[in-house]
Amino acid sequence: MSDLNDWNRAVIEEFRANEGRAGGMFEGKPLLLLHHVGARTGTARVSPLMYQDVEGGYAVFASKAGADTNPDWFHNLAANPRTEVEVGTETIQVSARVAEGEERERIWRRQKQDHPMFADYEAKTSRVIPVIVLERI
């Protein structure tokens, strides 16, 4: 797990040093930093995530690169939905909720169209990948 933590830390540092931009796999892609609190530990955490602009906020995707389990940040948001994100140089207060039905399908379809790697993630797992809407507070 330390490799993932080191990778996340490097992306976060690059994001903050470059006014919300990062290179590598995130070059030219919409990236935000999601702040979340551990559901069991209470530990403050930050995760870099690709996002999609949606009315009133942002959508993020609990893809975990196609793993058969949801990422930890998803469980943390379920326990503590009020949080903040960093987008560009701005820090924004948000409230998280899981998109359902037509809303989820519309957002998810666009994400796969705009960023085909998400279709690859979907193909790797039997679970429905949650779409989380982060609404500005």
Image (spheres, grey):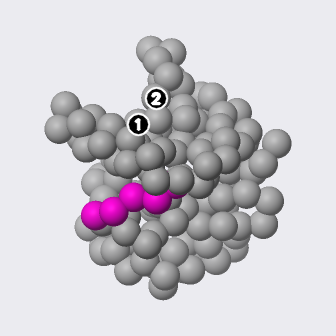
Left or right? Give the position of 93 relative to 20.
Answer: right
Q: Earlier in the sequence, mark 2 or mark 1?
A: 2
Location of mark 2 (residue): 45
Q: What's the amino acid at mark 2?
A: Arg
Quarter that holds the C terminus: top right
Given this view, does label 2 or label 1 mark the residue nearer the observer? 2
Q: Are circles 2 and 1 on residues that touch, CB within 8 Å?
A: yes
On the image, which quarter does residue 101 sit in? bottom right
Quarter that holds the N terminus: top left
Does residue 22 belong to the magenta stretch?
yes
Expressed as whole percent of the image width and height from the top left, the position of residue 67 reads 28, 54
Left or right? Give the position of 5 relative to 54.
Answer: left
In this orientation, which residue lies closer to the viewer: 4 or 104? Answer: 4
Within 10 angstroms of label 2, few (less than 14), some, or many (20 or more) residues? few
Structural distance between the alpha carbons of marks 2 and 1: 10 Å
Expressed as whole percent of the image width and height from the top left, the position of residue 90 reads 67, 47
Query: Does residue 100 lie above or below 137 as drawn?
Result: below
In this orientation, which residue lies closer to the viewer: 63 or 134? Answer: 134
Q: What's the amino acid at mark 1?
A: Asp
Location of mark 1 (residue): 72
Q: Can residue 125 be seen in the rendering of this structure? A: no
The segment highlighted magenta reads 20-24
Expressed as whole percent of the image width and height from the top left, the position of residue 15 reads 44, 50
Left or right? Give the position of 13 relative to 56.
Answer: left
Outermost residue on the top side: it is 41
Expressed as whole percent of the image width and height from the top left, the position of residue 34 reads 54, 42
Within 10 angstroms of label 1, few (less than 14), some, or many (20 or more) residues? some
Does residue 110 belong to the magenta stretch?
no
